[in-house]
Image: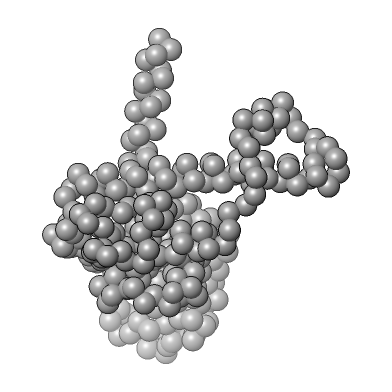
């Protein structure tokens, strides 16, 4: 029974590791949907005033989407690898396809949340109804009072709609929600088609076989996980050594004491080594052998692009 549970846990672990980007994007989308629902219930209040309706409706859709986009860029490691690359090497090794791929990767990852926000806002229709109500032509509604104008049309999204116009409210809201949801479905179709075409283009233009690219992805995930785990232990052991040198002793738990004894750390890595493994990385080969990361390249003692190093516009995601 124990072995069966262990095998199942390993399977799920491998499943999630192999689909980490897809799952992360899904979680981001679900979080965005929840945030949008909360915003609609708590924070959205149409001003029901000409000129203000339009600005408020656009802001309700656009401002949160912009904030989510910027947060996505900030949380993307490629953004800061690009900053480090520009500071250290001025991206001199990046070709035009590689630069395009880099910015596409950053923007694509960051666009998941804002696109989800925009789609959900359009499908709900509240912000669009608020923004567009004042622009409806009263003549298109049979029997609409001729003495009513833009000021009255702007009040349709709110509860204080004039009594003589209540019979038109349902039709106005239904028409605007139809337009909003139509735009939402169009946006979904455009995004889905774009993703499909980009995936096809990526696999058609990639010089790597499907299995090698899958292996490269697994290598990156394992290297990142092992590097972060080892860096945490190394930092803790080095910190314990320095604290002990200052105070004469260091307060450690039993597990930490065992860790300090097992892993002897003399000193931190010099800055040139950190610079070698930091920054953007494009897939490279040296004399036919692949170099899967900057750390891999450093470990193989390949200087620069090597004497026989081929660079390909494939970004380490």
Quarter of the image where the N terminus is located: top left
x, y (%) of residue 44? 54, 66
Vertical order, 289 against 89 (above or below): above
How many badges with numbers are in the image?
A: 0
Residue farthest to the top, as pictured: 1
Q: Residue at x 33, y 84 (%)?
A: 137
Which corner quadrant of the image does residue 102 belong to? bottom left
x, y (%) of residue 201? 17, 63
Q: Is residue 2 left or right of residue 47?
A: left
x, y (%) of residue 168? 37, 72
Which corner quadrant of the image does residue 94 belong to? bottom left
Q: In front here: 304 or 172?
A: 304
Residue farthest to the right, as pictured: 247
x, y (%) of residue 71? 51, 65
Q: In front here: 207 or 71?
A: 207
Vertical order, 148 against 99 (above or below): below
Applied colour scheme = one colour
Q: In front here: 56 or 206?
A: 206
Q: Residue at x 58, y 54 (%)?
A: 269
Q: Residue at x 29, y 70 (%)?
A: 98
Q: In front here: 195 or 239?
A: 239
């Amino acid at each position: 029974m124990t072995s069966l549970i262990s095998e199942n846990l390993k399977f799920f672990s491998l499943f999630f590791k192999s689909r980490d980007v897809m799952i992360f994007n899904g979680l981001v989308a679900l979080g965005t949907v929840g945030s949008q629902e909360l915003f609609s219930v708590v924070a959205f209040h149409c001003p029901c005033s000409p000129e203000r309706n339009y600005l408020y409706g656009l802001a309700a859709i656009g401002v949160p989407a912009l904030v989510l986009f910027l947060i996505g860029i900030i949380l993307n490691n490629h953004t800061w690898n690009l900053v480090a690359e520009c500071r250290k090497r001025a991206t001199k090794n990046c070709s035009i396809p590689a630069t395009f791929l880099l910015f596409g990767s950053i923007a694509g990852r960051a666009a998941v949340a804002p696109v989800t926000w925009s789609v959900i806002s359009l499908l709900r229709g509240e912000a669009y109804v608020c923004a567009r109500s004042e622009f409806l032509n009263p003549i298109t509604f049979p029997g609409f009072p001729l003495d009513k104008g833009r000021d009255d049309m702007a009040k349709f999204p709110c509860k204080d709609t004039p009594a003589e116009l209540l019979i038109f409210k349902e039709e106005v809201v239904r028409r605007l929600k139809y337009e909003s949801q139509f735009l939402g479905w169009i946006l979904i179709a455009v995004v889905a088609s774009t993703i499909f075409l980009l995936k096809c283009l990526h696999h058609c233009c990639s010089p790597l076989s499907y299995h090698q690219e899958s292996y490269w992805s697994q290598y990156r995930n394992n290297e990142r996980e092992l590097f972060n785990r080892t860096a945490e232990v190394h930092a803790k052991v080095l910190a314990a050594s320095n604290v002990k040198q200052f105070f004469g002793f260091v307060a450690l738990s039993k597990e930490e004491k065992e860790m300090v004894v097992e892993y002897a750390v003399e000193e931190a890595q010099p800055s040139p080594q950190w610079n070698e493994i930091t920054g953007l990385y494009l897939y490279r080969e040296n004399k036919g052998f692949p170099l899967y990361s900057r750390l891999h390249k450093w470990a193989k003692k390949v200087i620069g692009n090597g004497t026989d190093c081929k660079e390909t516009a494939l970004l380490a995601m």
